[in-house]
Image (cartoon, rainbow, N blue to C red):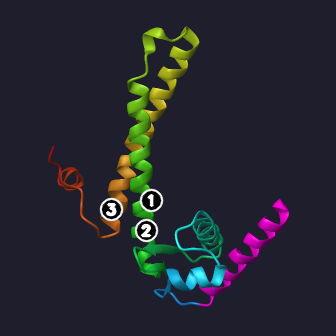
Amino acid sequence: MEKEVNVEKLEKIKKLTEEFLAKNYGETLEHFYIAEIIGEKIGSNDYRYVVRKTSEILMESGKAIRNVRGVGYKIVSPDEYLPLASREMKGAYTRVKKANKILNVAPEKEMSPFARQALNEAKDHARVLENLMGGARATFVKLSGRRENPYVNMIQSGQR
C-alpha cells in the first residue's frame, strides 16, 4: 500500500513539474489550478509536499518558483534569482544567529570537560560562520537592489 502512495505522489509531482516547465518566466499557476492538477486540497500536507518536491526538481532544471501569497506559485524571472537567494540567505543568517544564542546560554559549568571543550570549539566556529553569513547577507542585499545596510555604506566610505 505504501508503494502505491509513493507512485501516486511521484505521478502528481511529474504532472505539476511538466505544467511548470511548459510555462514562461513570470507566469503564475494559481492554487486552485495546482490543486486540480494534483488532486489535493489547497494547503494540505500532500499539496505542500508535491509543490515542495516539484520546486526541487524545477530548481535542478534551472527554473525556480516562489509563492505568491493567496494566489499560487510564480515562475521566477531571471532578474529575480538574486533577490530570491537573498531572502534565503537572510533566513540562513537568522538561524545561525539563533544557534549562536543557544551555544552562548548553554550551562557550561555543569558540563563534562569533554562536552565543555566541544562547546567552546562549536562556539568559535559558529561565531566565524555568523560573521561570514552577515557579510554575505549584506552583499546579497546590496547587489539585489533591496534596502541597503547602513553599515555597509559606512565601511565603504571609510567611516567607523
Identity of the amino acid at label 1?
Answer: Glu
Amino acid at pointer 2: Leu
Nearer-the-camera pick, 110 or 132 = 110
Residue wearing tag 1: 88
Dot 1 or dot 3, earlier in sequence: 1
Q: Is residue 8 visible?
A: yes
- Which is in the foreground here, disc 3 or disc 2? 2
> Label 2: few (<14), some or many (≥20) within 10 Å?
some
Are the two marked residues, 1 and 2, in contact with CB atoms closer than 8 angstroms? Answer: yes
Image disc number at residue 141: 3
The residue beneath circle 2 is 84
Per the image, label 1 sits on a secondary structure element best described as: helix
Under mark 3, the amino acid is Val
**Image coords of residue 108 (percent x, y):** 44, 14
Residue 55 as seen in the image, left or right of residue 27 = right
Magenta residues span 1-22
Q: Secondary structure at mark 2?
A: helix
- Report x, y in % for residue 128: 43, 36
